[in-house]
Amino acid sequence: MSSTIRPAHRTLLLLLLLLLAALALCVCPPAPAHAGQTVTLKTSLKPDRLGVRTTIEFGFAVHSTIPRRAPAPLTDVDLQLPAGLGLATSTLGLANCEPAALLARGVAGCSANARIGFGSALVAVPAEEESVLEEGSLTAFVGPPNSEHLEVLFYAEGRSPVSAQLVFGGQILDDNAPFSGRLNTAIPLIPTWPGGADVVVTRLTSTIGPLGLTYYRRMGKKIVPFHPRGIAVPKRCPRGGFPFRVDITFLDGSRAGATSTVPCPR
Amino acid sequence: MDRHRQQTAGSRAALLGAAAIGALILGPGAARAAAREVSLQETGYLHAIGEPGDTIDERGHASGTYSCSITVHLTIISANRVTAVFTVRPKGGSVTGRGLARFVQKGADGYFGGTIAITGGTGGFAHASGTNIGISGVIDRETFALTVHVHGKIDL
């Protein structure tokens, strides 16, 4: 039952295949050059003194390896935090924030005592010619209590050109030396319009710490403002400073990472 | 066959009796061979000493099986894990142990739970031993006031 092809037919078949290949080349759009992303990370401590409680400032930026093209949408951001710095002995997040309340009422939907930081995000809205950029504010809260890990909620709000609000969550997970933990955040896809491209987060900066935050407590009949206790900085600096690392996963399946070290204070 | 079993059981009882008498006569050295198991149920109330950083030193009082002073040294080793070294000082000696616990932050409180093992003792507790002793508790994140429960069995 084995099939055989005569030489004349074989030549015809070969010509047909070549024709199909040529047609395919004419009809199909050119395959895009393999796009990739690079990431940069900046970190600092404020104040930057050993043995003094502090606020962590971090910011990452994503760049496409193809000029004038927006990077692929982010799906996961993993920020590793150095050993010795932790939220556990701070008083950040004395209350918990529910995502539903945040979505319904914005930052007013959650207790001020649930805030643990704030910052901004720059997003690119892909368009025909060139991406449209939009900057929005970012507020970080401690999320609902979880039996396993500390939940962090980010509330992002953009005003112009598009008014939009977004809530996305992360978890603080265990990590190994030289890190003490990592903030693993899933970034939801943000469609521009049905069937349209997704919005891309190209830059995100945030604090984690008491800088600029005011908490409130009830003392008798009065509500008294206070500053939450910051993140403990060890009295001795680890060799080489305090290392941070960010690893980002993109919708196209690629990954990119960057490291940043806060040098030992002099 | 039954008689043989009875004789063996009788011999065993005689041996245990002799050992017990020997322990009484010979003192603590022999008592070590006949360690007794104590069911431990302690609750401690502690407060922080000094400024907590990535370690927290706590001191206080425990009650339950023993009424004694207690110190706990907590080291935060990662986002959700702490090591605990504790020393209790019941009448006649002290017992020291260490262990690992999970730590979870919920609002103004931090909860921890894990197991500890006894690593040493002094005085009448010089030969204290025990592993897999449960430890759990809650720490007030503002004041660092600590309530700790210890439950398990120790051999003395």
Image (cartoon, grey):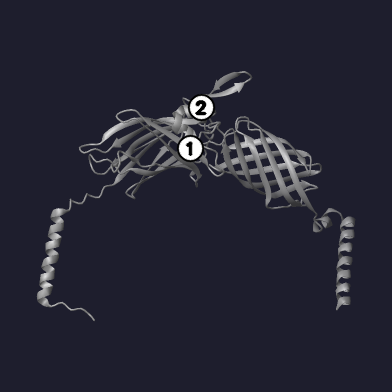
Residue A6, placed above or below residue A54: below
Tally the marks. Answer: 2
Residue B37, placed above or below residue A157: below
Q: Is residue A204 left or right of residue B1?
A: left
Q: Residue at left 13%, top 78%? A: A6
Q: Residue B148 in the image: state x and y as whole percent.
A: 68, 40
B38 vs B84, nearest the viewer:
B38
The residue type indicated by label 1 comes to Val
Q: Which mark is residue A152?
A: 1
Q: Secondary structure at mark 2?
A: helix
Residue A120, placed above or below residue A76: above
A95 vs A184, nearest the viewer:
A95
| Badge 1: chain ID | A
| Badge 2: chain ID | A
User: Extreme bottom residue here?
Assistant: A1
Q: Is residue A162 left or right of residue B75?
A: left
Q: Is residue A74 left or right of residue B103?
A: left
Q: Residue at left 55%, top 41%? A: A146
Q: Earlier in the sequence, mark 2 or mark 1?
A: 2
Residue at image mark 2? A112
Cα distance, mark 2 to mark 1? Answer: 14 Å
A99 vs A203, nearest the viewer:
A99
Q: Residue A234 in the image: state x and y as whole percent.
A: 53, 35
Taking the image as drawn, is residue A231 in sight? yes
Q: Residue A64 in the image: state x and y as whole percent.
A: 28, 42
Q: Residue B86 in the image: state x and y as whole percent.
A: 68, 42
Which of the image's four quarters has the N terminus of chain B?
bottom right
Sort mark 2 into few (<14), some (14-19) or many (20+) by Cα contacts within 10 Å. some
